[in-house]
Image (cartoon, rainbow, N blue to C red):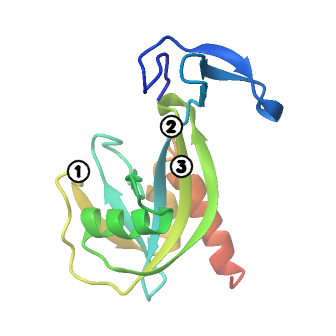
Amino acid sequence: MELNYCTRCGSPLTYRVIGDEGEQKYCSRCDTFFFDNPAVCVLTAIINEKEEILLLKQNYISEKNYTLCSGYAKKDETLEQTVAREVLEETGQHVLSCRYIRSFWYKPKGLIMAGFAAYVNESAFNHSSEVDGLMWADYGKALKLIERENNYSGELLDMCSDKLKAGE
């Protein structure tokens, strides 16, 4: 979110140098610096005990291809908690453990996306209204079906596949 006014007093923000950060937004009335922080979300490759990937069909993202699970972090929530919550909400699967893979900057929406692999024991699907369908697929099939245009699902899946093949 980009701030233009002080969240405490409502005064217009100006710019002032703050150490190594350079010029940052500043309220001279409150003597407070403000930073334009991106929204944070997780992008998660869900992997079951058979090393299959759970693909999500979300027509608002792609009518043709599948995606991985994603969602915004909430206040007072760690990224790992966000992974567990989003996986449960969107798929009905319970996360046993998760591992951070890498982050992505998604410029069109000003998002920092934290990429994870989440491990589950396959259970019955219980998807949210955001999800049009769910499907377990082996890596080969998943790589063919995953969305790659304006979406980091394919890149994260590639990285998970490489790590799994390497036995990590």
Name the residue tied to disc 2.
Answer: 150
Going 35% across and 41% down the picture, which residue do you hit?
61
Q: What amino acid is found at the position of numbered circle 3 in the picture?
A: Met
Query: In the rendered structure, are the residues bearing label 3 and label 1 in contact, judged by CB atoms less than 8 Å apart?
Result: no
Question: To which quarter of the image does residue 116 belong?
Answer: bottom right
Compared with 13, 45 (above or below) is below
What is the number of callouts on the image?
Answer: 3
How far apart are the alpha carbons under marks 3 and 1? Answer: 19 Å
How far apart are the alpha carbons under marks 1 and 2? Answer: 18 Å
Q: Where is residue 28 in the image (x, y as percent from the top left)?
A: 60, 16
Among numbered discs 1 and 2, the one appearing first in the sequence: 1
Q: Is mark 3 on a helix, strand or loop?
A: strand
Q: What element carries label 1?
A: loop
Compared with 2, 85 (above or below) is below
Q: Is mark 2 on a helix, strand or loop?
A: loop
Quarter of the C terminus within the rendering? bottom right
Q: Where is residue 70 in the image (x, y as percent from the top left)?
A: 40, 55
Compared with 135, 72 (above or below) is above
Query: In the rendered structure, are the residues bearing label 1 and label 2 in contact, judged by CB atoms less than 8 Å apart?
Result: no
Res. 130 mark: 1
